[in-house]
Amino acid sequence: MNNFIKSMDWFSILLYACLVFIGWINIYSTTYSADHQGLMNLDTFYGKQLMFIIVSFITIIITLAIETKFYERFSSVIYLVTIISLAGLYIFGKNINGATSWYAIGGMTLQPSEFAKAATALALANYASDIQTDLTNFKDLLKAFAIIFLPALLIIPQPDPGSALVYLAFFFVLYREGLSVNYLLIGIFGILVFISTLLFGTLWVSLITIALLVLMYLFYKRTKRRISAFKLVSIALLTVALSYSVSFIYDHVFEQRHRDRFSLWLRLEHDPSKLDHIRKTIGYNTYQSESAIGSGGFSGKGFLEGTRTKGNFVPEQHTDYIFSTVGEEWGFLGSGLVVILFAALVIRVIFLAERQKSVFSRIYGYSVASILFFHFAINIGMVIGLLPTIGIPLPFFSYGGSGLLGFTMLLFIFIKLDANRINEW
């Protein structure tokens, strides 16, 4: 027992504890009222979150007490149970704020999508670590994609596209395990075509693509290197087709609120009055969040001194927009510290993943790092207006029992695997 305690990575545990504590402090600040008494007052968000933290500590003890081999041997069962729980939402789920993402259990709610990330990471690690699996083989790669995207496909119609988007983080894991860089390049290319189409239109995207391909052909011809004309024509046709599909989806599939969010993000609306109207309606949360963070300055206004936080200017500030409280009350210094803590945790997990003797543990470790990075980068980008609002919480920070428990399990399963690495061969 003493050897196990010594072998645990206490630096990761310390970073986790710091993030959870700072997160709770900011939840307390966003929901504090002079009328509320007692930290464990379950009528308050900070009281409930403190209870969730206590439950998380119990979860940590249970997670660390389970034998390491259990996570590998029963990963498929855990994954299957998770898939069933996600599918069951369409029959037994409770609708909250227009999304059927929760089970109502007594007076509590449980969101299975928060636990599906760890289950998917375990299932992918189990499959990809099998000696018969070769991710350079297209058939094996399709099976890996199926493991990753099946939960996402069940989450999207809830509707919860933000949680489903997180599953793209697993591409970083597959890349580490041998996925061709071409898949990442195709993904980046698709994103560029999507954004360029919205900014400049299909005609300009088509003309620029053709011009670039002609220049590429002339360059190869001048250097006397061969390039297939068929390949260039195929790229041109695919780009044009993708651009047209983007335009069609944007105009005929997206609802007006979705178009407004992209219009605000990419500044597509050039009429200042209309842009200001969109910013104060559809983009109200982001607008107020930016204002709150900007008002914090270098050192912030001080704990419980945020005027915009106290005035409830930022909707849902204790959940997805919790970082705006950090910016207003703790300023650039506090915000920078939070970013450093998250970055340190992600880098530490990657370091630990690389020293694993078990392929299963390494893949799972990279899954943890990728999911945490994806969440924290997108959430902060969303809160400061660099990315559109898509409803992704900040790990260990945002209010919510399912989220805190899900991320805690995700991290401490890996800490358990890492502590046991000396027994892995």
Image (spheres, rainbow, N blue to C red):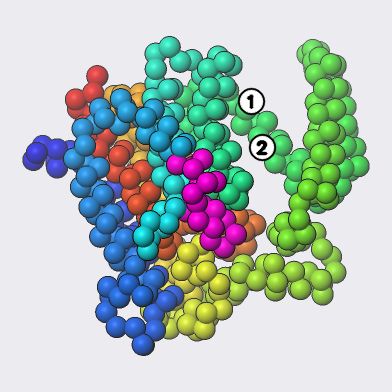
Q: State whether residue 381 is above or below residue 327.
A: above
Residue beneath disc 1: 182
Dividing the picture into quadrants, the one containing residue 242 is top right
Q: How much space separates mark 2 and mark 1, taking CA atoms?
A: 10 Å
Q: Position of residue 154 (x, y in %)?
A: 56, 40
Q: Is residue 105 left or right of residue 254?
A: left
Q: Which quarter shows the N terminus?
A: top left
Which residue is rendered at x = 8% and y = 40% of the image? Answer: 2
Q: State whether residue 284 is above or below residue 304.
A: above
Q: Position of residue 323 (x, y in %)?
A: 48, 65
For badge 1, the amino acid type reads: Asn
Which residue is rendered at x = 55% and y = 27% of the image? Answer: 145
Residue beneath disc 2: 188
> Which type of secondary structure does the marked residue at label 2 adopt?
helix
Give the crowd class for mark 1: few <14, some 14-19, many >=20 residues within 10 Å: few
Dividing the picture into quadrants, the one containing residue 350 is top left
Q: Position of residue 257 (x, y in %)?
A: 73, 61
Question: Which range of residues does the magenta coloring cover?
Answer: 85-102
Q: Is residue 88 visible?
A: yes
Q: State whether residue 39 is above or below residue 135.
A: below
For badge 2, the amino acid type reads: Ile
Q: Position of residue 382 (x, y in %)?
A: 58, 59
